[in-house]
Amino acid sequence: MTQFSMGILACQTESNFARAYSEGAPKNTLWEHAYEDVLDVMAKLPEIAAIIYRRKYFDGVVKKDHSLDYSGNFCRMLGYDDAGFDELMRLYLTIHSDHEGGNASAHTTHLVGSALSDPYLSYSAGLNALAGPLHGLANQEVLGWIQDLQKKFAAEGKPVNKDTITEFAWETLNGGKVIPGYGHAVLRKTDPRYTCQREFALKHLPNDELFKIVDTIYQVMPGVLLEHGKAKNPYPNVDSHSGVLLWHYNFTQYEYYTVLFGVSRAMGALSQLFWDRALGLPLERPKSITSEWIRDQFSK
């Protein structure tokens, strides 16, 4: 993610928005230059992401096929030539684009952009928020939790089923940890993005071992969390499924998963940034309060 953020910043010298602003463009035309930057950033992101992937894990060679759609060309640049993986990436890029503008990466992009920082600077900041463990790393944490569960019961000679998953869940909770991939700050029901991925798995990989575990977890975990009593939302979110799908197609470099998330999230965060400029929204700042206000509020 550090390389990804730096890659976007390295392209900032090509910003239409920054150049137009420095040349005195009227404020009511800034949206036009923001629009051009947004399209340029969207076009550059997949190749930057692919260069990082190919250089870190393989031979550094990036091949393109512009006859394909955004997903297909991105998959070829990553080195994948599989119609099933193309379809998964279409789904992945769509459902991770955004879910509400209040998430950390989209909001950071908006906040930095409100200072009239160009889309390159703004989205690089958004990526830095996405890199935080509480935001963009959840899908790999879910995958790790499932694989730890597998290893534990394989070593003990036990099957992975409803009973052993329940046992492992209680061990996790009683150890003061959370069940990764369950609960959501906004949703109070099963994440529809989870449902999309579940339907994909039922269609394309119904017999995959990890998917069967995810399916069984889905059957028992809400009950465990409701009994535990601390979860406001005991249902799965998008992260509880995505890593398993990528792993099925041999995309096993899970520390890279957040970069895929970053390619996708740009669609939501940058489109919102465009509307910020089109509507002429002001510089965002938190409301300031005084020590007097605090005293009056809490002395009542």
Image: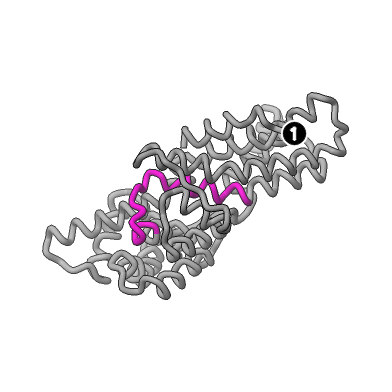
Q: Is residue 258 magenta?
A: yes
Magenta-highlighted residues: 246-267
The answer to whether 293 is drawn above or below residue 110 in the figure is: above
Residue 287 visible in the shown view: no
- What's under tag 1, amino acid-wise? Phe
149 or 224, which is in the foreground? 149
Residue 40 visible in the shown view: yes
Q: Quadrant of the C terminus?
A: top right
Q: Residue furthest top?
A: 22
The answer to whether 34 is drawn above or below residue 222 in the figure is: above
Q: Residue at x 70, y 43 (%)?
A: 273
Can you tell which quarter of the image residue 54 is in? top left
Can you tell which quarter of the image residue 148 is in? bottom left
**Badge 1 local density, few (<14 within 10 Å), some, or many (20+)?**
many
Determine whether the residue tagged by mark 1 lies in a helix, strand or loop: helix
Residue 79 percent across, percent down from the top left: 41, 50
Q: Is residue 290 magenta?
A: no
Q: Residue at x 38, y 54 (%)?
A: 180
Residue 280 percent across, percent down from the top left: 82, 41
Q: Which residue is mark 1?
A: 17
Q: Residue at x 70, y 39 (%)?
A: 37
130 or 7, which is in the foreground? 7
Q: Main secondary structure of the magenta part?
A: helix
Count of residue discs: 1
